[in-house]
Image: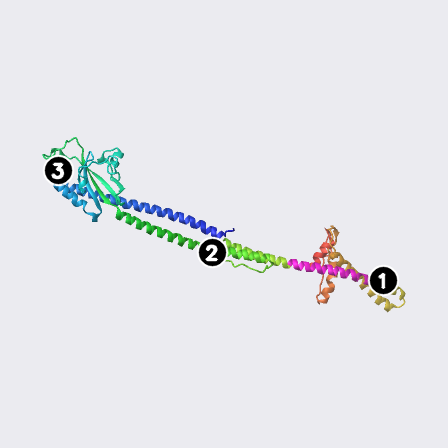
Amino acid sequence: MRTRIGTRLIFGAGLATALAIGGMSVAILRSHTAQLLAERTRSADQLSETIKSATHFDMLENRRENLHRQIRDVGGLHDEGIRKVRVFNKEGKIMFSSTSEEIGTSLDPKGEACYACHAEGRPLERLGIQARARTFRAADGTRVLGVINPIPNEPSCSTAACHAHSSKQSLLGVLDVNVSLAEVDKEIAHSRLVITVSAVVAILSGSLMLWWLNRRLVVRPVAALVEGTRRVMEGDLGSTIPVSGRHELGALAKAFNEMTQTLAETQRQLTQADKLASVGRLAAGIAHEINNPLTGVLSYASLLRKRMEHDAPACEDLDVIVRETVRCRGIIRELLDFARPAAPARKPMDLNEVVRRSVSVVMTQLSLNQVNLSLDLAADLPQVQADPNQIQQVVVNL
């Protein structure tokens, strides 16, 4: 099945546009997703720092009830996206949690809350915020962002009277804050929808524009060229193609029009040449047929001239008849030589003589048209090497 070049151009350009816009959309969406997640991570880390600051004195003075109350209160702020807040010691035992049933349990070192620290192989207090953050799915399928924040050992902790810690212990525990990513996922989904719709609209708009440009700049000019070529093939050399635009197809249409004009002129010249050739053949045939009666007239006029030598007026009239008959035979002979195709035969020739013979061939026609022809020939022209018959044809044509 034949496919139009315009269709191929639109398909290729549309595919390239779709790939470019699709790649750009994916890159923008990934960048936007990473930006939203980074902002949410920073917000969760700031929240954990706020919780650490708010519970610092309660931890320092071992006010466990106040700690439980504050962590439950903060963990209950579901409108703010907080799902869970908990504190566990360095062994992974949960000491405080907004979910009461977790208190006293131990975490799996390979679990989602511990894996990041253990996988890094570095002390927790030296990990960046991105390394301390992780995302996972909750039981209800919602994505959750968890940020762990180390609780370092301070001099006040190691010297406090209530629950002193060893000064060699650098980490007392970890604060784990879990926040919901539902809003972030909703915004990502909305951004994905907006970007997808925008990409589809851009691709469709670009394809429509390409279709319009292709139809205007390629399809129509090519169709006009095809139609013009078909008409020329059918013999219509007078057809022209509209020149549309200053581009390659416009130049091609202009060249096509010039070609058809040249072909039409060449055809006209060939037709005229064929007519002239037919007239020449006809004239040669007529001249050949006229030559025989002229020979009879010349013979009888010469015979009468001999018989009537005593009648001077009659002899003068007969001399005129003989002279004009001889001249007519010469004109016919030259006409036959002119019409008879022959191979070029170069030989020394007198140009003046050839001109005179040529003039004698056309003089009758000139006289009938009341045209006076005067010759001004140079007497000292040298002879040239040429074919007399062909030179005579040139002069007669002139």
Q: Where is residue 26 in the image (x, y as percent from the top left)?
A: 35, 46
Question: Residue at 77% across / 61% down in the picture?
Answer: 287
| Image spot of residue 152 (x, y percent) | 18, 36
Residues tagged 1 and 2 counted as in contact (Cβ below 8 A) = no
Name of the residue lying farthest toward the front: 101
1 or 3: tag closer to the N-terminus:
3
List x then y, in percent, for residue 375: 72, 61
Q: Distance between the residues labelled 2 and 3?
A: 80 Å
Residue segment shown in magenta: 269-293
Gap in Å between the C-alphas at discs 1 and 3? 159 Å
Q: Mark number for residue 215?
A: 2
Q: Can residue 221 be seen in this view?
A: yes
Query: Can residue 331 be seen in the rendering of this structure?
Result: no
Disc on the earlier residue, 2 or 3: 3
- Foreground: disc 2 or disc 3: 3
- Which amino acid, by three-letter code, is at mark 3? Leu
Q: Which of marks 1 and 2 is nearer the N terminus?
A: 2
**Camera-nearest label, 1 or 3:** 3
Residue at position x 31%, y 49% in the image: 189
| Residue depth check, mark 1 versus mark 2: number of the one nearer the observer | 2
What residue is shown at x 82% (from left), y 65% (from top)?
Answer: 321
Q: Tell me the tag on residue 299.
A: 1
Which residue position is annotated with label 3? 60
Q: Which quarter of the picture shows residue 239? A: bottom right
- Label 1–label 3 contact, CB within 8 A: no
Q: In this view, does 285 lie to the left or right of 73?
A: right
Question: What distance separates the C-alpha of mark 1 from that of mark 2?
Answer: 82 Å
The residue carrying pointer 1 sits among few (fewer than 14), some (14 to 19) or many (20 or more) residues within 10 Å by Cα, namely some
Query: For numbered disc 2, what is the local secondary structure?
Result: helix
Q: Is residue 257 left or right of residue 307?
A: left
Q: Tell me the quadrant of the picture where the C terminus can be found.
A: bottom right
